[in-house]
Amino acid sequence: MTIQDVRRIHELNDVNTSDWTEEELHYHQRVMSDLSPWLNVQGTAMLSQIIKEIQKRD
């Protein structure tokens, strides 16, 4: 899977993180972590869900 194959965050908004691919989880975790100082409450909650899903899979 390449970066072009990773669905955009707005496409994943209504998809449970358990249905995201590993690549999608890691990509969006990295991007959202970089942007974390500017995330709103919803963004922070989504980042938390992503991190929990990554930890659950490891």
Image: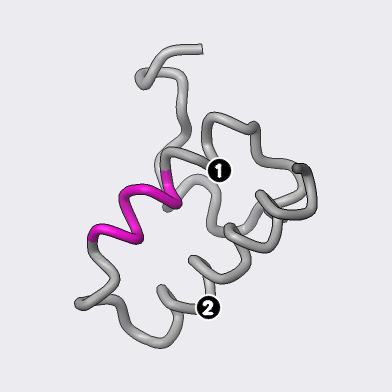
Residue 45 drawn at (x, y percent): 52, 78
- Callout 1 crowding tier (Cα within 10 Å): few <14, some 14–19, many ≥20: many
Find the distance from the CA under tag 1 to the CA under tag 2: 14 Å
Residue 38 screen position, x and y as percent: 20, 77
Q: Where is residue 43 in the image (x, y as percent from the top left)?
A: 41, 73
Of helix, strand and loop, which one carries label 1? helix
The residue at the far front in this view is: 58
Amino acid type indicated by mark 1: Leu
* Label 2: element kind: helix
Residue found 23% across the figure and 64% down from its top: 35
- In which quadrant of the rendered view does residue 23 lie? top right
Few, some or many C-alpha atoms within 10 Å of disc 2 (few <14, some 14-19, many ≥20)? few
- Residue 10 versus residue 30: which sits nearer the camera? 30
Front residue of this view, candidates 41 and 58: 58
Q: Give the range drawn in magenta.
A: 28-34
Residue 8 to residue 1: above or below: below
The reply, left or right, for residue 43 in relation to residue 11 is: left
Please tell me whether residue 33 belongs to the stretch shown in magenta.
yes
> Residue 41: x and y, percent?
41, 87
Q: Which colour scheme is used?
A: one colour
Q: Are marks 1 and 2 in contact (CB under 8 Å)?
A: no
On the image, numbered disc 1 is attached to which residue? 25
Please check the rendered image and state whether residue 29 is part of the magenta-colored stretch, yes or no.
Answer: yes
Q: Is residue 42 rendered to the left or right of residue 12?
A: left
Q: In this view, does 15 lie to the left or right of 48?
A: right
Is the magenta region chiefly helix, strand or loop?
helix
Residue found 49% across the figure and 45% down from its top: 11
Residue at which label 2 appears? 45
Furthest residue to the top?
A: 1
- At 44% from the left and 52% from the top, the residue drawn is 29
